[in-house]
């Protein structure tokens, strides 16, 4: 018989651990990469536009950057004819979107995830570059989805525009209205204050556990004790993240062209977007934690039992199909499943290659057929790579 105390404990521990084990580290990484995009965006756009032969490589490198910002910037470049369709696919294949931060956070907390973190990014990059060049060589486009071997369908994509126009001008800006906008743009400083405190204690917890392998954070509700204070910091941080999450208009994908456009023009907006993006990751990580814990509680099946279903070709196909879903939310759940050893590394790699993060949304707005074929074209190498890794017995 499941008791109310057990349910409350699962919720509290999931909220605390989501913040201290994931959110604080994600926040630091999101801010770092957001700042780099803010500092270098204009120079990058002009560079990739001129380097036609290197575009799939550069696109894949942009996709490797954690988060969806780098990949999103590529979509208006394709719509304006600056980059090839193969470059778009290379970018989408290489990106792990916001789920990359989940894997990075896991690697920071547990060195066992460092090798999978590196391996999945290398595999995604190689798959992206190879597939991108293959697509361009065979003349595959949304109008010719089978390349030179199939019929021509649909409408032409826009041609390249004049030299004077800037790609970043295509990115819209958020409209400063609505309660959600005010909550996000006025509450982000409070969120950052709590997150910085949480980061300090998260680092201390890593140090303490390194000094004493048997050390564990106990659940306490007394804020005057160390364990209780840390617990309340975790609860407060996750609660604030949930508020920021619901203040957004996009609940399945946090990055939009408007938020990217804002943070590429303002350091303040970069900090706001970093808080928003991290809040998005926190919410979906917490959902994943709760799903796993309640699944174990009510089903009586252990996580070890669950992992037996996360291996094999069915897991690879399922992970690839999940990657078809636009947005980062479902992908964060898939990556979290790997960090909890529910799915295998081949399934992780298949999902990483198949998923497009939030980058598909801008293409969907501009050209629905292109976005449809793009997600299909990225799923094919995902299944191939996953099966190869499975047959080779690779399991990190």
Image (spheres, grey):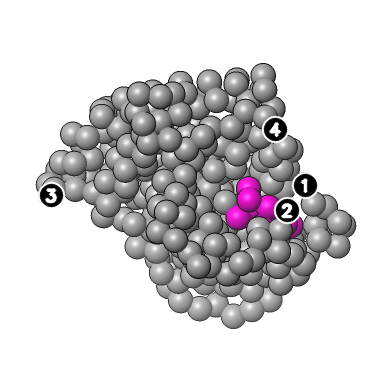
Lower position in the chain sequence, tag 3 or tag 2: 3
Which of the numbered marks, if any, corresponds to residue 370?
none
Q: Is residue 343 magenta?
A: yes
Q: Does residue 20 appear to the left or right of 172 in the view shown? A: right
The alpha-carbon separation of the residues under discs 1 and 3 comes to 46 Å
Residue 299 image offset from top left, x and y in percent: 58, 69
Q: Residues within 10 Å of mark 2 (few under 14, many from 20)?
A: many
Lower position in the chain sequence, tag 1 or tag 4: 4
Closer to us: 359 or 290: 290
Which of the numbered marks, if any, corresponds to residue 111?
4
- Element marked by disc 1: loop
Lower position in the chain sequence, tag 4 or tag 3: 4
Which of the numbered marks, if any, corresponds to residue 178?
3
Residues rendered magenta in the picture: 337-347
Lower position in the chain sequence, tag 2 or tag 4: 4
Q: Residues within 10 Å of mark 4 (few under 14, many from 20)?
A: few
Which of the numbered marks, if any, corresponds to residue 396?
1
The alpha-carbon separation of the residues under discs 4 and 3 comes to 43 Å
Q: Pointer 2: what residue?
A: 345
Q: Does residue 272 appear to the left or right of 350 in the view shown? A: left
């Amino acid at each position: 018989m499941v008791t109310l105390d057990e349910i409350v404990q699962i919720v509290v521990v999931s909220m605390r651990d989501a913040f201290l084990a994931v959110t604080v580290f994600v926040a630091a990484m999101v801010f770092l990469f957001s700042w780099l995009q803010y500092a270098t965006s204009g120079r990058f756009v002009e560079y990739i536009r001129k380097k036609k032969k290197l575009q799939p490589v550069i696109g894949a490198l942009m996709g490797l950057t954690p988060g969806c910002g780098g990949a999103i910037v590529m979509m208006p470049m394709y719509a304006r004819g600056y980059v090839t369709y193969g470059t778009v696919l290379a970018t989408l294949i290489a990106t792990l979107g916001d789920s990359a931060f989940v894997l990075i956070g896991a690697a920071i907390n547990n060195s066992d995830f460092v090798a999978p973190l590196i391996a999945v990014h290398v595999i995604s990059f190689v798959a992206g570059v190879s597939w991108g060049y293959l697509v361009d060589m065979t003349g595959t486009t949304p109008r010719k989805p089978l390349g030179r071997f199939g019929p021509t369908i649909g409408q032409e994509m826009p041609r390249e525009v004049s030299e004077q126009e800037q790609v970043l001008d295509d990115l819209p800006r958020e409209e400063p209205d609505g309660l959600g906008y005010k909550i996000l743009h006025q509450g982000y400083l409070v969120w950052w204050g709590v997150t910085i405190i949480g980061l300090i204690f998260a680092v201390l917890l890593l140090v303490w556990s390194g000094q004493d392998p048997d050390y564990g954070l106990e659940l306490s509700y007394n804020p005057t004790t160390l364990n209780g204070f840390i617990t309340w910091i975790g609860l407060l941080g996750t609660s604030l993240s949930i508020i920021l999450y619901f203040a957004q208009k996009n609940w399945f994908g946090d990055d939009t062209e408007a938020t990217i456009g804002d943070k590429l023009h303002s350091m303040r907006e970069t900090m706001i977007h970093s808080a928003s993006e991290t809040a998005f990751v926190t919410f979906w990580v917490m959902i994943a934690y709760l799903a796993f814990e309640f699944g174990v509680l009510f089903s009586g099946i252990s996580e070890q039992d669950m992992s037996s279903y996360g291996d094999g070709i069915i897991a690879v196909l399922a992970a690839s199909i999940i990657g078809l879903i636009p947005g980062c939310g479902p992908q964060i759940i898939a990556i979290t499943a790997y960090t909890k050893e529910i799915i295998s590394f081949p399934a992780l790699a298949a999902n990483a290659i198949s998923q497009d993060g939030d980058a598909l949304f801008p293409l969907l707005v501009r050209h629905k057929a292109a976005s449809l074929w793009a997600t299909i074209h990225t799923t094919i190498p995902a299944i191939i790579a996953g099966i190869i890794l499975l047959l080779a017995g690779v399991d990190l």
